Image (spheres, grey):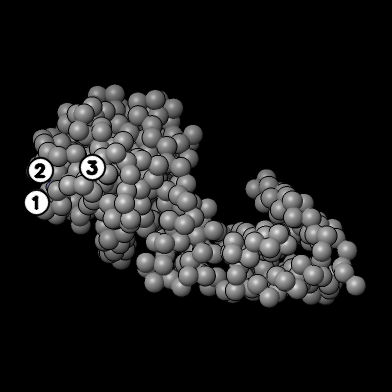
Amino acid sequence: MEKQNQIESGRVVGQKIMTLFELIDNDNILSCLDNIVSGKKVSTAYLFHGKDGAGTEAFALEFAAKLLCGSRNNKPCGSCSSCRKMKTLQHPDLFLVYPLPSKEDSRTIDPFKGLSSKKIEEIQQLLQKKSEDPYTKLLVSGARSIPISFVRWIRKQVYMKPQESSARCVIVFDAHLLTIEASNAFLKVLEEPPENTIFILTSEFPESILPTIRSRCQALFFPQLPEGKIENKLVQKGIPGEKAKLIANLSAGDLTAAYKILDYDIIEIEDMAINLLVYIATWNKNKLKEKLQNMVEIYRKDQYKFFLVLKIIQRWFMDAALLKLGMDGHLVLYNRRDRLIRFVKSFPDFDVEGLHRAIDYCVDLLRSNVYISLALVNLFFDLKEGLGRRAK
Ligand SMILES: [Zn+2]
C-alpha cells in the first residue's frame, strides 16, 4: 500500500512501478494518466508526442490498459481477463494502427489484404515483441505510411459496441504518417466521435499531423529520458556497462533509439570514428581520400550508421574536454581513456566548441542536401583547424 501511495504522488521508489507494461516513468506522466482515469475526465482523443523511446507508445498502451481493465481502478489490475488480453495486445477492444506497406488506390477496407503471409508473420512477431517490451518499434519493413484502408477498417469497428470492456481504445502509432486521405477519413471519425471510444495518437513529429486532427486531441509531451535510466535498462538487458553507457549517451534520451543502436557493432563504429580522427590529425591525404570514399559509401547505404560515426566523434571531443578538466569519472568512451590522454597531450589547444560546431554544421549541410563529398571535405578541414597546433 505504501508503494501505491508513492506512485500516486508521482514518486517511484527503486525501479519497480506498478504497471501492466514495464515502463520507465517519465516526468510524472504516469500519475498524470492515473489522475485522468480516476477523475473520470477522459477525453475522446489524446496526442502523446515526443521521442518514441521517451515512452509515448509504451504509455499509450498502459493508458489503454487502465481504461479497459475490468477492476475500474485507475491502475490495471493485471489479473482480470481484460488485463491478460491487453498484456499480449490481443484485447478485442484494443485497436492498433501503424504504418503498413499498402496500395493506396484500392477501395479495400482491410489494410492487411494483399499482404504476403511472410509479411503477416513479420507483423505478428513485431506485435509480440511490442507486448514484451513496449519500447520496441513496430516497424514493418517497407511501410512508409498509414493507408486509408486502416482508417476505414477502424471506422467500421468503432461504431459497434465494445466486445469485452466498457470502452474501446484505438492507438495510432506514428500518427504523422497518416496519408492525406487517411487523415481526412480519420478527422471525420473524430468529428463524430463514437461512444466509449478513446483515441490515442503518438508521434515524434506532431507538426506533421493535420492541424484539424491535432486540435481535437489533448496533447501530452514526453521529455527525453535521463541517460542514466536508459543505461540501467540496457544493463538489465545484459548489455555490458561501458557499452550501455555509450549507447545511452548516443540515444539522446530515447530508449527506442538505444535499441536500434544495439543492432549495430558499436565498437566497429567507434574504431571508424577514431581512425578518421587520426588521419585528420596527421593530415594523411591518401588515407583521407580513402576515408572520404568510405564515408560516402556508408552515407549512401545507411545514413543512421553514418550519423552514429559523427556522434561518436563529437563525443570524443567532449570526453577529451572532460579529461582535461580531470573529470575522468564522466567519460563516456572510458574504454578509450589511454588514447584520449594521448590525444589531449598531442593537441593541448583543441577547440571543443569549434569542433562540436563543425560536426553540427556538417549535419546541417547534409540535411539541406549539400553534396555529401563536399560536406565531408569541409568537415575534414574544419576538424583539422579545430584541433589546433600539435604539441612538439
Ligand atoms: Zn484488470
| In the depicted structure, whether residue 241 falls above or below residue 19 | below
What label sits on residue 81 in the rendered view?
1
The image shows residue 369 at horizontal and vertical percentages of 68, 48
Residue 165: image location, x then y, percent: 11, 41
For the C terminus, the image quarter is: bottom right
Q: How far, Cα to Cα, is label 2 from label 1?
A: 8 Å
For discs 2 and 3, the disc positioned in front in the rendered view: 3
Q: Is mark 1 within 8 Å of ligand 1?
A: yes
Could you say which quadrant of the image residue 14 lies in?
bottom left
Task: Give the camera-side residue of 149 and 302.
Answer: 302
Q: Amino acid at mark 1?
A: Ser
Tag 1 secondary structure: helix
CB of mark 3 near ligand 1 (< 8 Å) = no
Q: Disc 2 vs disc 3: Cβ atoms closer than 8 Å? A: no
Sequence-wise, the earlier of marks 3 and 1 is: 3
Q: Verify CB contact (< 8 Å) between mark 2 and mark 1.
A: yes
Nearer the observer, 165 or 144: 165
Measured Cα–Cα span from mark 2 to mark 3 = 21 Å
Is the shortest distance between ligand 1 and the CB of mark 2 under 8 Å? yes
Say which element carries label 2. loop
Nearer-N-terminus badge (2/1): 2
Disc 3 is placed on an element classified as: helix
Which amino acid, mark 2? Gly
Q: Nearer the viewer, residue 143 or 347?
A: 347
* In this rendering, the label closer to the viewer, 3 or 1: 3
Q: Which residue is mark 2?
A: 70
Q: Which residue is mark 3?
A: 5
